[in-house]
Image: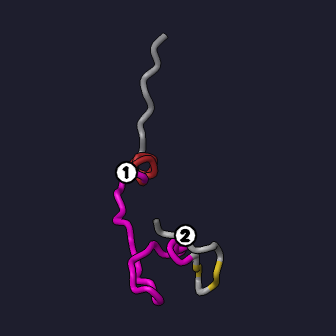
């Protein structure tokens, strides 16, 4: 036997659609090099994160 679909409340609908918003990617200016980079990410050119050497710098070809 067919069963009617239940109502989706405004709250449930909103929670489902919360991931639909498109956020603009933010960038910050690096203190040392002055280039733009993502916040809380390692700078791959210098290998620095929060002023500490985390990775070996990449060699440019």
Residue 32 location (% of width, % of height): 47, 89
Residue 26 location (% of width, % of height): 39, 72
Quadrant housing residue 38: bottom left
Mark positioned earlier in the residue sequence (1 or 2): 1
The magenta-colored residue range is 19-46
Q: How is the image coloured?
A: secondary structure
Task: Please tell me whether residue 25 belongs to the stretch shown in magenta.
Answer: yes
Mark 1–mark 2 Cα distance, whole angstroms, equals 36 Å
Mark linked to residue 20: 1
Q: Kindly give the residue lying farthest to the bottom in the view shown.
A: 31
Secondary structure at badge 2 equals loop
Residue under the point 37% across and 51% down: 20
Secondary structure at badge 1 equals helix
Mark linked to residue 58: 2
Q: Is residue 16 above or below residue 44?
A: above
Quadrant housing residue 57: bottom right
Q: Nearer the viewer, residue 21 or 60?
A: 60
Mark linked to residue 6: none
Task: Please tell me whether residue 21 belongs to the stretch shown in magenta.
Answer: yes
Quadrant housing residue 37: bottom left
Residue under the point 65% across and 76% down: 54
Name the side, left or right, on which 16 lies relative to 44: left
Mark 1–mark 2 CB contact (< 8 Å): no
Q: Nearer the viewer, residue 43 or 58?
A: 58
By secondary structure, the bulk of the magenta-drawn segment is best described as: loop
Q: Kindly give the residue lying farthest to the top in the view shown.
A: 1
Q: Is residue 18 above or below residue 2?
A: below
Residue under the point 53% across and 78% down: 46
Residue 30 location (% of width, % of height): 44, 84
Q: Nearer the viewer, residue 23 or 3?
A: 23
Q: Nearer the viewer, residue 3 or 22?
A: 22
Which tag is nearer the camera, tag 1 or tag 2?
2
């Amino acid at each position: 036997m067919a069963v009617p679909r239940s109502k989706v409340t405004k709250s449930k609908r909103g929670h489902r659609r919360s991931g639909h918003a498109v956020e603009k990617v933010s960038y910050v200016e690096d203190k040392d090099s002055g280039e733009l980079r993502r916040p809380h990410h390692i700078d791959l050119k210098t290998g620095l994160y929060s002023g500490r050497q985390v990775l070996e710098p990449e060699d440019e070809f």
